[in-house]
Image (cartoon, grey):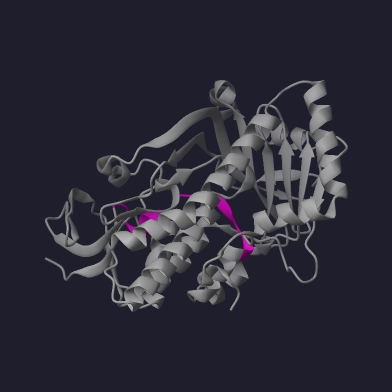
Amino acid sequence: MSGKRDLLILGGGLVGMTLALAAAKQGITSHVVDKALPEELTAEGTDGRASAISTASWNLFGNIGLAQRLEPLGCPISAIAVTDGMKPGRIDFQPGPEDGTLGRMFANRDIRLALFEAARGESAIAWSSGVEPVTRERGEHGVSVTLSDGRTLEASLMIGAEGRQSPTRAEAGLSSARWDYRHRAFVTAISHVRPHEGVAWEIFYPAGPLALLPLLDLPDGRHRSAVVWTVDERDAAGIAGLSDAVFLSEITSRMESVFGATELIAPRMSYPLNFHHAARITGQRLALIGDAAHGMHPIAGQGLNLGLRDVGCLVEVLADGMLLGLDPGDAQLLARYERWRSLDSVSVMATTDALVRIFGIPGRLPSMVRRLGMGLIQRSGWMKRFFMDEARGMSGQLPTLLKAQ
Protein backbone atom coordinates (compact mmCIF):
# COMPACT_ATOMS: atom_id res chain seq x y z
CA MET A 1 0.00 0.00 0.00
CA SER A 2 1.41 3.38 -1.03
CA GLY A 3 1.42 6.32 1.40
CA LYS A 4 -1.68 8.48 1.68
CA ARG A 5 -1.60 11.71 -0.31
CA ASP A 6 -3.87 14.74 -0.66
CA LEU A 7 -5.25 13.99 -4.13
CA LEU A 8 -5.97 10.83 -6.09
CA ILE A 9 -6.14 11.99 -9.73
CA LEU A 10 -7.67 9.39 -12.03
CA GLY A 11 -6.55 10.36 -15.53
CA GLY A 12 -3.11 11.71 -16.37
CA GLY A 13 -3.92 13.53 -19.60
CA LEU A 14 -3.45 17.22 -20.34
CA VAL A 15 -5.86 18.43 -17.65
CA GLY A 16 -5.15 15.76 -15.03
CA MET A 17 -1.38 16.19 -15.18
CA THR A 18 -1.68 19.98 -15.18
CA LEU A 19 -3.70 19.68 -11.98
CA ALA A 20 -1.00 17.51 -10.40
CA LEU A 21 1.70 20.05 -11.27
CA ALA A 22 -0.34 23.08 -10.21
CA ALA A 23 -1.20 21.38 -6.93
CA ALA A 24 2.44 20.43 -6.33
CA LYS A 25 3.45 24.10 -6.62
CA GLN A 26 1.10 24.75 -3.67
CA GLY A 27 2.53 21.90 -1.63
CA ILE A 28 -0.42 19.60 -2.36
CA THR A 29 0.59 15.99 -2.96
CA SER A 30 -1.05 13.61 -5.41
CA HIS A 31 -1.25 10.13 -6.85
CA VAL A 32 -1.81 10.23 -10.64
CA VAL A 33 -3.19 7.11 -12.31
CA ASP A 34 -3.44 6.63 -16.07
CA LYS A 35 -4.07 3.45 -18.04
CA ALA A 36 -1.81 4.59 -20.89
CA LEU A 37 1.98 4.61 -20.76
CA PRO A 38 3.59 8.04 -21.34
CA GLU A 39 5.65 6.73 -24.25
CA GLU A 40 2.41 5.63 -25.94
CA LEU A 41 0.81 9.05 -25.49
CA THR A 42 3.85 10.93 -26.82
CA ALA A 43 4.78 8.65 -29.74
CA GLU A 44 4.96 10.34 -33.14
CA GLY A 45 1.59 10.16 -34.91
CA THR A 46 -0.40 9.06 -31.84
CA ASP A 47 -2.20 12.40 -31.48
CA GLY A 48 -1.98 14.80 -34.40
CA ARG A 49 -4.26 17.35 -32.77
CA ALA A 50 -3.26 20.88 -31.83
CA SER A 51 -4.82 23.09 -29.16
CA ALA A 52 -5.36 26.82 -28.89
CA ILE A 53 -4.06 27.86 -25.48
CA SER A 54 -5.80 31.03 -24.32
CA THR A 55 -4.06 33.91 -22.56
CA ALA A 56 -5.39 32.76 -19.18
CA SER A 57 -4.26 29.17 -19.80
CA TRP A 58 -0.83 30.40 -20.86
CA ASN A 59 -0.63 32.34 -17.58
CA LEU A 60 -1.35 29.06 -15.79
CA PHE A 61 1.41 27.26 -17.66
CA GLY A 62 3.79 30.09 -16.81
CA ASN A 63 2.86 30.04 -13.14
CA ILE A 64 3.55 26.30 -12.82
CA GLY A 65 6.90 26.46 -14.61
CA LEU A 66 6.02 25.19 -18.12
CA ALA A 67 6.48 28.40 -20.08
CA GLN A 68 10.22 27.99 -20.63
CA ARG A 69 9.73 24.49 -22.04
CA LEU A 70 6.77 25.44 -24.24
CA GLU A 71 7.60 28.98 -25.40
CA PRO A 72 9.73 27.94 -28.41
CA LEU A 73 7.10 25.43 -29.57
CA GLY A 74 4.01 27.64 -29.73
CA CYS A 75 2.75 29.83 -32.54
CA PRO A 76 1.16 33.11 -31.37
CA ILE A 77 -2.39 33.78 -32.57
CA SER A 78 -2.27 37.39 -33.69
CA ALA A 79 -5.87 37.57 -34.97
CA ILE A 80 -8.99 35.48 -35.56
CA ALA A 81 -11.00 35.74 -38.77
CA VAL A 82 -14.60 34.48 -38.61
CA THR A 83 -16.52 34.13 -41.87
CA ASP A 84 -19.73 32.56 -43.17
CA GLY A 85 -18.54 30.44 -46.08
CA MET A 86 -15.90 33.03 -47.12
CA LYS A 87 -18.71 35.46 -48.05
CA PRO A 88 -18.46 39.21 -47.34
CA GLY A 89 -19.18 40.33 -43.78
CA ARG A 90 -16.51 38.59 -41.74
CA ILE A 91 -15.36 39.50 -38.24
CA ASP A 92 -11.70 40.23 -37.56
CA PHE A 93 -10.64 39.97 -33.95
CA GLN A 94 -7.34 41.76 -33.40
CA PRO A 95 -6.07 42.51 -29.88
CA GLY A 96 -4.61 45.86 -28.92
CA PRO A 97 -0.94 46.35 -28.03
CA GLU A 98 -1.75 46.02 -24.32
CA ASP A 99 -3.37 42.60 -24.83
CA GLY A 100 -0.52 40.75 -26.51
CA THR A 101 -1.81 37.78 -28.49
CA LEU A 102 -5.19 36.05 -28.55
CA GLY A 103 -3.47 32.85 -27.50
CA ARG A 104 -0.93 30.33 -28.76
CA MET A 105 -1.20 27.17 -30.83
CA PHE A 106 0.59 24.05 -29.61
CA ALA A 107 0.70 20.48 -30.79
CA ASN A 108 -0.92 18.34 -28.09
CA ARG A 109 2.14 16.09 -28.17
CA ASP A 110 4.42 19.00 -27.22
CA ILE A 111 2.22 19.93 -24.26
CA ARG A 112 2.22 16.31 -23.07
CA LEU A 113 6.00 16.04 -23.34
CA ALA A 114 6.45 19.23 -21.30
CA LEU A 115 3.95 18.08 -18.65
CA PHE A 116 5.47 14.63 -18.32
CA GLU A 117 9.02 15.98 -18.10
CA ALA A 118 8.00 18.39 -15.35
CA ALA A 119 6.02 15.72 -13.47
CA ARG A 120 9.02 13.38 -13.33
CA GLY A 121 10.92 16.00 -11.36
CA GLU A 122 8.19 16.61 -8.76
CA SER A 123 8.41 14.61 -5.53
CA ALA A 124 4.86 15.71 -4.68
CA ILE A 125 3.58 13.64 -7.65
CA ALA A 126 3.46 9.84 -7.47
CA TRP A 127 2.70 8.67 -11.01
CA SER A 128 1.30 5.24 -11.84
CA SER A 129 0.95 4.57 -15.59
CA GLY A 130 -0.08 1.49 -17.54
CA VAL A 131 -2.57 0.52 -14.82
CA GLU A 132 -6.21 1.29 -14.12
CA PRO A 133 -8.53 1.24 -11.12
CA VAL A 134 -10.30 -2.02 -10.40
CA THR A 135 -12.26 -0.65 -7.45
CA ARG A 136 -12.87 2.86 -6.15
CA GLU A 137 -13.80 3.66 -2.56
CA ARG A 138 -14.97 6.98 -1.09
CA GLY A 139 -15.64 7.15 2.60
CA GLU A 140 -16.06 9.59 5.45
CA HIS A 141 -12.33 9.84 6.14
CA GLY A 142 -10.70 9.33 2.74
CA VAL A 143 -10.67 7.70 -0.68
CA SER A 144 -8.79 4.80 -2.22
CA VAL A 145 -8.43 2.76 -5.39
CA THR A 146 -7.20 -0.73 -5.96
CA LEU A 147 -5.20 -0.91 -9.17
CA SER A 148 -5.00 -3.65 -11.78
CA ASP A 149 -1.48 -4.49 -10.54
CA GLY A 150 -2.81 -5.16 -7.02
CA ARG A 151 -1.61 -1.98 -5.33
CA THR A 152 -3.90 0.23 -3.24
CA LEU A 153 -3.56 4.03 -3.29
CA GLU A 154 -5.08 6.31 -0.66
CA ALA A 155 -5.83 10.03 -0.55
CA SER A 156 -8.17 12.62 0.90
CA LEU A 157 -9.89 13.66 -2.35
CA MET A 158 -10.61 11.76 -5.56
CA ILE A 159 -10.43 13.63 -8.90
CA GLY A 160 -12.20 12.33 -12.01
CA ALA A 161 -10.10 13.44 -14.98
CA GLU A 162 -10.45 10.51 -17.40
CA GLY A 163 -12.31 12.41 -20.15
CA ARG A 164 -15.81 12.25 -21.57
CA GLN A 165 -16.39 8.58 -20.78
CA SER A 166 -15.25 9.02 -17.17
CA PRO A 167 -15.95 5.80 -15.25
CA THR A 168 -15.46 7.73 -12.01
CA ARG A 169 -18.33 10.08 -12.91
CA ALA A 170 -20.54 7.17 -13.94
CA GLU A 171 -19.80 5.15 -10.79
CA ALA A 172 -20.58 8.21 -8.62
CA GLY A 173 -23.97 8.55 -10.31
CA LEU A 174 -23.34 12.13 -11.46
CA SER A 175 -25.70 12.45 -14.42
CA SER A 176 -25.09 14.79 -17.32
CA ALA A 177 -27.07 16.45 -20.09
CA ARG A 178 -25.83 15.06 -23.39
CA TRP A 179 -26.59 15.00 -27.08
CA ASP A 180 -24.91 13.98 -30.29
CA TYR A 181 -24.23 16.67 -32.89
CA ARG A 182 -24.05 14.00 -35.60
CA HIS A 183 -20.86 15.68 -36.73
CA ARG A 184 -17.38 14.25 -37.15
CA ALA A 185 -14.16 16.26 -36.99
CA PHE A 186 -11.29 15.42 -39.34
CA VAL A 187 -7.96 16.64 -38.01
CA THR A 188 -4.70 17.01 -39.92
CA ALA A 189 -2.06 19.61 -40.84
CA ILE A 190 -1.10 21.29 -44.11
CA SER A 191 1.85 23.23 -45.42
CA HIS A 192 1.12 26.21 -47.66
CA VAL A 193 2.82 28.79 -49.87
CA ARG A 194 1.45 31.98 -48.29
CA PRO A 195 2.24 32.79 -44.64
CA HIS A 196 -0.67 32.60 -42.19
CA GLU A 197 0.65 35.68 -40.33
CA GLY A 198 -0.64 34.22 -37.09
CA VAL A 199 -4.29 34.40 -38.18
CA ALA A 200 -6.67 31.64 -37.09
CA TRP A 201 -9.52 31.15 -39.54
CA GLU A 202 -12.99 29.87 -38.58
CA ILE A 203 -14.94 29.32 -41.81
CA PHE A 204 -18.54 28.29 -41.16
CA TYR A 205 -20.59 26.05 -43.43
CA PRO A 206 -24.03 24.51 -42.68
CA ALA A 207 -22.48 21.02 -42.61
CA GLY A 208 -19.84 22.20 -40.12
CA PRO A 209 -16.97 24.67 -39.74
CA LEU A 210 -13.49 24.49 -41.21
CA ALA A 211 -10.83 25.79 -38.82
CA LEU A 212 -7.33 26.74 -40.02
CA LEU A 213 -5.05 27.23 -37.05
CA PRO A 214 -1.54 28.73 -37.29
CA LEU A 215 1.46 26.58 -36.40
CA LEU A 216 5.17 27.38 -36.43
CA ASP A 217 6.90 27.09 -39.78
CA LEU A 218 8.62 23.81 -40.56
CA PRO A 219 12.43 23.65 -40.26
CA ASP A 220 12.72 23.92 -44.05
CA GLY A 221 10.78 27.21 -43.97
CA ARG A 222 7.43 25.93 -45.23
CA HIS A 223 4.40 27.59 -43.65
CA ARG A 224 2.13 25.29 -41.68
CA SER A 225 -1.41 25.23 -40.23
CA ALA A 226 -3.51 22.73 -38.31
CA VAL A 227 -6.84 21.82 -39.89
CA VAL A 228 -10.08 20.82 -38.15
CA TRP A 229 -12.78 20.07 -40.72
CA THR A 230 -16.22 19.25 -39.30
CA VAL A 231 -18.62 17.30 -41.52
CA ASP A 232 -22.04 15.72 -41.24
CA GLU A 233 -21.76 12.21 -39.81
CA ARG A 234 -23.68 10.88 -42.82
CA ASP A 235 -20.84 12.03 -45.09
CA ALA A 236 -18.00 10.99 -42.78
CA ALA A 237 -17.45 7.47 -44.16
CA GLY A 238 -17.21 8.79 -47.69
CA ILE A 239 -14.78 11.53 -46.70
CA ALA A 240 -12.65 9.09 -44.70
CA GLY A 241 -12.36 6.98 -47.84
CA LEU A 242 -11.06 9.82 -50.02
CA SER A 243 -7.47 9.73 -51.20
CA ASP A 244 -5.14 12.32 -49.67
CA ALA A 245 -5.17 14.31 -52.91
CA VAL A 246 -8.98 14.48 -53.10
CA PHE A 247 -9.28 15.16 -49.36
CA LEU A 248 -6.85 18.06 -49.72
CA SER A 249 -8.76 19.37 -52.74
CA GLU A 250 -11.99 19.41 -50.71
CA ILE A 251 -10.32 21.43 -47.96
CA THR A 252 -8.69 23.95 -50.29
CA SER A 253 -11.95 24.54 -52.17
CA ARG A 254 -13.65 25.44 -48.89
CA MET A 255 -10.95 27.90 -47.87
CA GLU A 256 -10.80 29.33 -51.40
CA SER A 257 -7.02 28.98 -51.60
CA VAL A 258 -6.48 31.63 -48.92
CA PHE A 259 -3.01 30.14 -48.37
CA GLY A 260 -2.20 29.37 -51.99
CA ALA A 261 -0.93 25.91 -52.92
CA THR A 262 -1.17 23.41 -50.05
CA GLU A 263 0.19 20.01 -49.15
CA LEU A 264 -1.00 17.45 -46.60
CA ILE A 265 1.81 16.89 -44.07
CA ALA A 266 0.19 14.90 -41.24
CA PRO A 267 -1.94 11.77 -40.89
CA ARG A 268 -5.70 12.27 -40.93
CA MET A 269 -7.58 11.52 -37.70
CA SER A 270 -11.30 11.75 -37.01
CA TYR A 271 -13.59 11.63 -34.00
CA PRO A 272 -17.34 12.12 -33.39
CA LEU A 273 -18.61 15.31 -31.78
CA ASN A 274 -21.08 15.48 -28.93
CA PHE A 275 -22.08 17.59 -25.96
CA HIS A 276 -22.22 16.65 -22.31
CA HIS A 277 -22.42 18.69 -19.15
CA ALA A 278 -22.60 17.19 -15.68
CA ALA A 279 -25.32 18.77 -13.56
CA ARG A 280 -23.05 18.32 -10.53
CA ILE A 281 -19.26 18.13 -10.60
CA THR A 282 -18.69 17.16 -6.97
CA GLY A 283 -19.75 14.38 -4.63
CA GLN A 284 -18.53 12.94 -1.34
CA ARG A 285 -14.75 13.49 -1.49
CA LEU A 286 -14.97 13.75 -5.28
CA ALA A 287 -14.44 16.50 -7.87
CA LEU A 288 -14.62 16.31 -11.66
CA ILE A 289 -12.39 18.36 -13.97
CA GLY A 290 -12.01 18.80 -17.72
CA ASP A 291 -13.95 16.60 -20.12
CA ALA A 292 -15.10 14.40 -17.24
CA ALA A 293 -17.21 17.40 -16.19
CA HIS A 294 -18.04 18.98 -19.55
CA GLY A 295 -17.37 18.16 -23.19
CA MET A 296 -18.23 20.47 -26.06
CA HIS A 297 -17.98 21.01 -29.80
CA PRO A 298 -14.50 22.24 -30.82
CA ILE A 299 -16.02 25.11 -32.82
CA ALA A 300 -14.52 27.80 -30.55
CA GLY A 301 -11.44 25.91 -29.36
CA GLN A 302 -12.41 26.27 -25.69
CA GLY A 303 -12.58 22.65 -24.49
CA LEU A 304 -9.06 22.34 -23.07
CA ASN A 305 -9.09 25.93 -21.81
CA LEU A 306 -12.28 25.28 -19.85
CA GLY A 307 -10.60 22.29 -18.22
CA LEU A 308 -7.55 24.36 -17.33
CA ARG A 309 -9.83 26.91 -15.65
CA ASP A 310 -11.20 24.01 -13.59
CA VAL A 311 -7.62 23.33 -12.53
CA GLY A 312 -6.93 26.92 -11.50
CA CYS A 313 -10.13 27.20 -9.47
CA LEU A 314 -9.80 23.82 -7.75
CA VAL A 315 -6.18 24.39 -6.75
CA GLU A 316 -6.98 27.82 -5.30
CA VAL A 317 -9.95 26.46 -3.35
CA LEU A 318 -7.90 23.56 -1.94
CA ALA A 319 -4.86 25.70 -1.11
CA ASP A 320 -6.99 28.30 0.68
CA GLY A 321 -8.81 25.63 2.65
CA MET A 322 -5.68 23.72 3.63
CA LEU A 323 -4.11 26.95 4.93
CA LEU A 324 -7.07 27.12 7.32
CA GLY A 325 -6.47 23.53 8.38
CA LEU A 326 -9.31 21.99 6.37
CA ASP A 327 -9.03 18.56 4.78
CA PRO A 328 -8.81 18.59 0.92
CA GLY A 329 -12.00 16.52 0.77
CA ASP A 330 -13.98 18.89 2.99
CA ALA A 331 -17.52 19.39 1.69
CA GLN A 332 -17.28 23.19 2.13
CA LEU A 333 -14.32 23.36 -0.24
CA LEU A 334 -16.00 21.18 -2.85
CA ALA A 335 -19.15 23.32 -2.67
CA ARG A 336 -17.07 26.44 -3.29
CA TYR A 337 -15.38 24.81 -6.30
CA GLU A 338 -18.73 23.79 -7.78
CA ARG A 339 -20.24 27.27 -7.33
CA TRP A 340 -17.19 28.94 -8.86
CA ARG A 341 -17.20 26.74 -11.95
CA SER A 342 -20.94 26.51 -12.57
CA LEU A 343 -21.61 29.89 -14.22
CA ASP A 344 -18.46 29.97 -16.36
CA SER A 345 -18.80 26.44 -17.70
CA VAL A 346 -22.52 26.79 -18.46
CA SER A 347 -22.06 30.13 -20.27
CA VAL A 348 -19.13 28.91 -22.40
CA MET A 349 -20.89 25.68 -23.33
CA ALA A 350 -24.20 27.40 -24.08
CA THR A 351 -22.45 29.92 -26.34
CA THR A 352 -20.57 27.18 -28.15
CA ASP A 353 -23.73 25.13 -28.65
CA ALA A 354 -25.60 28.19 -29.95
CA LEU A 355 -22.85 28.85 -32.52
CA VAL A 356 -23.11 25.28 -33.79
CA ARG A 357 -26.87 25.58 -34.24
CA ILE A 358 -26.94 29.12 -35.68
CA PHE A 359 -24.30 28.44 -38.31
CA GLY A 360 -25.79 25.02 -39.07
CA ILE A 361 -28.98 26.50 -40.58
CA PRO A 362 -28.71 26.23 -44.39
CA GLY A 363 -30.09 28.67 -46.93
CA ARG A 364 -29.52 32.17 -48.27
CA LEU A 365 -31.71 34.03 -45.80
CA PRO A 366 -30.09 32.57 -42.67
CA SER A 367 -26.68 33.32 -44.19
CA MET A 368 -27.68 36.92 -44.83
CA VAL A 369 -28.95 37.31 -41.26
CA ARG A 370 -25.77 35.81 -39.85
CA ARG A 371 -23.57 38.09 -41.93
CA LEU A 372 -25.63 41.11 -40.92
CA GLY A 373 -25.05 40.23 -37.27
CA MET A 374 -21.36 39.64 -37.88
CA GLY A 375 -21.13 43.04 -39.58
CA LEU A 376 -22.67 44.68 -36.51
CA ILE A 377 -20.12 42.99 -34.25
CA GLN A 378 -17.30 44.00 -36.59
CA ARG A 379 -18.29 47.66 -36.20
CA SER A 380 -18.95 47.51 -32.47
CA GLY A 381 -15.90 48.10 -30.32
CA TRP A 382 -17.36 46.89 -27.03
CA MET A 383 -18.85 43.71 -28.54
CA LYS A 384 -15.54 42.78 -30.15
CA ARG A 385 -13.80 43.44 -26.85
CA PHE A 386 -16.30 41.18 -25.05
CA PHE A 387 -15.77 38.28 -27.46
CA MET A 388 -11.99 38.73 -27.44
CA ASP A 389 -11.90 38.65 -23.63
CA GLU A 390 -13.96 35.46 -23.73
CA ALA A 391 -11.61 33.89 -26.27
CA ARG A 392 -8.57 34.90 -24.19
CA GLY A 393 -10.19 33.48 -21.05
CA MET A 394 -9.79 36.81 -19.28
CA SER A 395 -13.41 37.45 -18.29
CA GLY A 396 -15.14 36.70 -15.01
CA GLN A 397 -13.58 35.92 -11.64
CA LEU A 398 -10.18 34.43 -12.42
CA PRO A 399 -8.20 32.29 -9.99
CA THR A 400 -4.73 33.58 -9.17
CA LEU A 401 -3.00 30.90 -11.23
CA LEU A 402 -4.68 32.17 -14.41
CA LYS A 403 -3.48 35.74 -13.90
CA ALA A 404 -0.18 37.13 -15.14
CA GLN A 405 2.34 37.26 -12.31
Q: Is residue 307 left or right of residue 190?
A: left
Q: Which of these two is toward me, 240 or 201?
A: 201
Which quadrant holds the C terminus?
Answer: bottom right
Can residue 47 be spotted in the picture? yes
- Residue 313 pos. (x, y %): 46, 63
Residue 87, percent from left and from top: 85, 34
Please determine whether, in this image, residue 148 is positioned above or below residue 321.
above
List x then y, in percent, for residue 375. Answer: 86, 41
Q: In the image shown, does 153 or 237 lie closer to the viewer?
A: 153
Q: Per the image, is 219 magenta?
A: no
Q: Residue at x 63, y 46 (%)?
A: 300
Residue 86 occupies quadrant: top right
Q: Is residue 44 visible?
A: no
| In the image, residue 141 above or below residue 272 | below
Q: Which residues are magenta?
A: 35-55
Q: Residue at x 34, y 54 (%)?
A: 287
State which quarter of the image contains the N terminus.
Answer: bottom left
Residue 44 lies in the magenta-colored region = yes
Q: How many marks?
A: 0
Horizontal side of 336 relative to 261 (left or right) equals left
Q: Quadrant of residue 252?
A: top right
Q: Is residue 309 above or below residue 49?
A: below
- Residue 83 spot, x, y in % from top left: 79, 40
Q: Kindly identify the residue that appears in the image at 29 percent across and 71 percent down.
A: 326
Residue closest to the eye, 384 or 66: 384
